[in-house]
Image: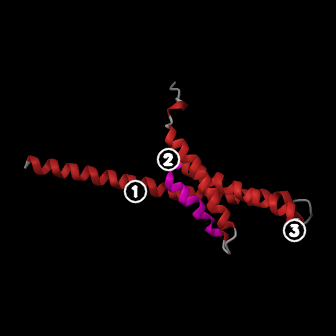
Amino acid sequence: MKIRNRGSETEPEVIIFYISIITAMIIAYFLTYMEYWQFILIAGIIPGLFNKKMKRGIYSGAIGVSIVWLLYMIYAMVTRNAYTNIDQFAGLIFGDTGYGWAIVILVFLLGALFGALGGSIGSGITIAIQLRSETLESDEKNSKTIKKSS
């Protein structure tokens, strides 16, 4: 049985991960006030570009966007009494009031999912670019060795 060494992660990767979460939070904050909420994918794509591993890209987008959306919902419920409207909306869906918490959880999960999707797209772009550059470098080396042997 092989035991994974959790201390093998390099320090710069961890710092980049935390920076990408903060970047996702800042971008998500500004994109929350846009007319189309679907642009929130951008808040996951850009931090996902910073991470070399897909797992970190997904987590950075999901954590950043979900924290901002959760704080925004809490702020709206406290200052504008938005929970009353959410509860009435849930009453239209479920047939009875008192299910506003389900809508709040749904919105939180949608934010996390959209952030994770954007993070995976951004991280996938980074991985694809790295693979392409490695392939081009190996092709150049192979062509040089073929020319030398001829």
Q: Position of residue 35 (x, y in %)?
A: 68, 75
Using the numbered discs, state the Cα–Cα distance from disc 2 to disc 1 in whole angstroms.
Answer: 13 Å
Q: Which residues are magenta?
A: 38-54
Residue corresponding to mark 3: 85
Q: Position of residue 23 (x, y in %)?
A: 59, 56
- Which quarter of the picture shows residue 90? bottom right
Count of marks, rendered view? 3
Residue kind at label 2, given as amino acid type: Lys
Q: Is 91 rendered above or below residue 3?
A: below
Query: What residue is shown at x 33% (from left), y 50% (from top)?
Result: 134
Q: Disc 2 vs disc 1: Cβ atoms closer than 8 Å? A: no
Residue 136 on the magenta segment: no
Q: Position of residue 64 (x, y in %)?
A: 64, 54
Q: Is residue 8 left or right of residue 62?
A: left
Q: Is residue 114 left or right of residue 6?
A: right
Identify the secondary structure beneath mark 1. Answer: helix
Identify the secondary structure beneath mark 2. Answer: loop
Q: Which mark is drawn over residue 129?
A: 1
Q: Position of residue 130 (x, y in %)?
A: 39, 52
Query: What residue is shown at x 55% (from left), y 44% (from top)?
Result: 15
Using the numbered discs, state the Cα–Cα distance from disc 3 to disc 2 in whole angstroms.
Answer: 41 Å
Viewer-proximal residue, 30 or 114? 30
Q: Earlier in the sequence, mark 3 or mark 1?
A: 3
Q: Disc 3 vs disc 1: Cβ atoms closer than 8 Å? A: no
Residue kind at label 1, given as amino acid type: Ile
Residue kind at label 3, given as amino acid type: Asn
Mark 2 closeness class: few <14, some 14–19, many ≥20 residues within 10 Å: some
Viewer-proximal residue, 66 or 89? 66
Residue corresponding to mark 2: 53
